[in-house]
Amino acid sequence: MNKIPTRIGCMALLVLLFKLSFGQNIYTVNTKQVKANVPSTLWGLFFEDINRAADGGVYAEMVENRSFDFPKPMTDWTTWPKPNLRDGIFMVINQSSVNIANPKYMSVNLQAKDTVGLMNSGFDEGMAFKKIPYNLTLRYRQVVPGVHVRVFLFNSNNRVIGHSAMTLENAMDWHNQEISITPTDTAKTGKLLVILEGAGKLDVDRISLFPSDTWKGRPGGLRVDLVQKLADLHPGFLRFPGGCIVEGNQIVHRYQWKHTIGPLEDREMVQSIWADDVAERQTPDYMESFGLGFYEYFQLCEDIGAGPLPIINVGMSCQFDAAEVVPVNELEPYITDALDLVEFANGDVNTYWGKKRAELGHPAPFNMKLLGVGNENWGPQYAEHLKLFTDRIKAKYPEVKLVNATGYSRNIPVFNYMDSVLRARKADIIDEHFYDTPKWFMDNSNRYDSYDRSGPKIFVGEYAAQSDRIGSMKNKNNLLTALSEACFMTGIERNADVVSMASYAPLFAHVTGWQWTPNLIWFDNTSSYNTPNYYVQQLFSVNKGTKVVPLLASGKAVCGQDSCWASAVIDQGTHELVIKLVNMSQKPKAKSIKLTDASAAGIATITTLANSDTGIANSISQPDQIKPETMTLNEKGKAIYFIAKPYSLNVIRVKLTQ
Ligand code: AHR
């Protein structure tokens, strides 16, 4: 965030005028009257492989369909130099009867002087290259030695910008071999060509290409710029893997965590529910490779300091799609998967799944405290399944808090039914989802004021204001939506004794490969940008504080009076009062915060996300159209004065003397 020195002059004059004229704009804060502890989990993240978030996104693999296992095995591949090579040179072998996880491979049969190739142009617009090393991994076996391999990288004009040769080892069984190639130039929409020549027979199971600058330099890892954006949000938790992909459009496509760990060739690919779920944005080649699987997920949580919150399938497919339900007497493998996941995350290295985790490189437990049972599930079938899961999980792991679903929306019969069932059962945490208009978010900032303080905790598991309408492809991540979410978030913060977690959804979207909008972070193959909604999340998260204290206007919480929304916390670590104030009007608002039991020490800042045009948004070409700016304030004593710009979120941090 930019730090701008105080502009004495205009601003000071405005403040002076205000000091002479304020009256109705006084808020009082009692810093000693603690309403709630701010849970460390309050502001977190929802990750789902939608919009190319994982494959083609944060998972840095550049080759699409790297193992020829897509339903159409030549998807994203072309043979070189011509499409119609004579029969037998390239053959896709399907051995699904003996290897379900990794059924297909490419058999290459060359006679003397054959020079052929396999070309891949990556995800969406093509492969983006920087002038850094790239690691190509070939998984192959020599059937009849004699095939030689060369690798070429092309830029958008089909000019070679990098090449290398691989001397194959004498491996008669499946073997991974790597070479490094450093392009001499950059490319935005490049491609990869693997040339095969000579005489012999080679089976190729996987051709993979990763940049060397992955997050923490991990081979086969994650895109550094995108993970950094997550880390910069300082999330309290990371929900994973969704979202609807937990359920799948049919039960066979559900997310199965055990299929996502260990060697890549053991990770059975599934067609994403997002391949064809959105009529306007069909993405038939959307497969889940699970290269970002459950081990990588737990590792990511640890890296960015977020508590893990996995969501498991409850024996039901997506209720918007086929709505398949597994019979109750066949649920055992599903319940076992849930129990085993806890053991994989937390178990001692002497347990079966704890040992697996250790073998993957992490003997220490991942310290998972939360588990979601079902995504957007609802109805009596869900209630019945959930009971069976809950009883078994609680019996073995009473310390793990369970998150339970209430369907896809609030205050409708679906929601009300689940809410009453879950409250009667004294559920740990209830997950509520809100995709609605900016007005709804503004009008409902007081939603949790009346919730039962001794009932289940609330997880606002998915929410996002829609600038057009729910499900519209025209929704934009503009300032209006972001500020309306901020209004709602002041209500969450004020009610942090009831709401223990909240996450915006969805998290990521590729600018050409998306199926759903709005989203928190947009990216292409080279860069990414923060939306105003991202900045709102960040401003709340990095200014989360430790104790909620009352901020009142005429004795009432500030939820819309004078077009303002506000909340306050104390940060005990820094001994600061932290105020969030949203001004949803086109006029500046002069405000005074009266401290009833403390004094400002004269060191304060105001960080503002503001613009008079509420339609303003960022983009790949203009990533910084709107971003927060920080100014210092010199307020001292029993009152703090500031001016909230038109259409703004303001975070005011005030050092206290006592
Ligand atoms: O966030 C996008 C989708 O919205 C999620 O997958 C689902 O849980 C909800 O319906």
Image: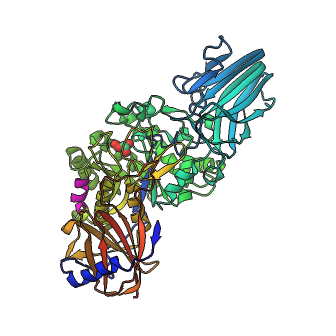
Choose between 271 and 137: the one closer to the eye. 137
Give coordinates of residue 100: x percent, y percent: 57, 27
What range is drawn magenta here? 438-447
> Is residue 596 depicted above or below 1 in this figure?
below
Choose between 105 and 128: the one closer to the eye. 128
Please check the rendered image and state whether residue 443 is part of the magenta-colored stretch, yes or no: yes
Which residue is situated farthest in the top direction here? 87
> Is residue 363 depicted above or below 68 in this figure?
below
Q: Is residue 272 visible in the rendered structure shown here?
A: yes
Give coordinates of residue 415: x percent, y percent: 24, 47
Choose between 335 and 180: the one closer to the eye. 180
Choose between 52 and 572: the one closer to the eye. 52
Quadrant showing the C terminus: bottom left
Position of 346 with respect to 176 (left or right) is left
> Is residue 646 depicted above or below 314 in this figure?
below
Which residue is at a point 29% across and 54% down the rendered structure image?
425
Please check the rendered image and state whether residue 50 is part of the magenta-colored stretch, yes or no: no
> Is residue 624 depicted above or below 512 in this figure?
below
Q: Quadrant of ligand 1?
A: top left
When asked about the image quadrant of residue 10, the answer is: bottom left
When asked about the image quadrant of residue 254, the answer is: top left
**What secondary structure characterizes most of the magenta part?**
helix
Give coordinates of residue 535: x percent, y percent: 41, 59
Q: Is residue 174 visible in the rendered structure shown here?
A: no
Give coordinates of residue 250: x percent, y percent: 40, 31
Colour logic: rainbow
- Tally of numbered discs: 0
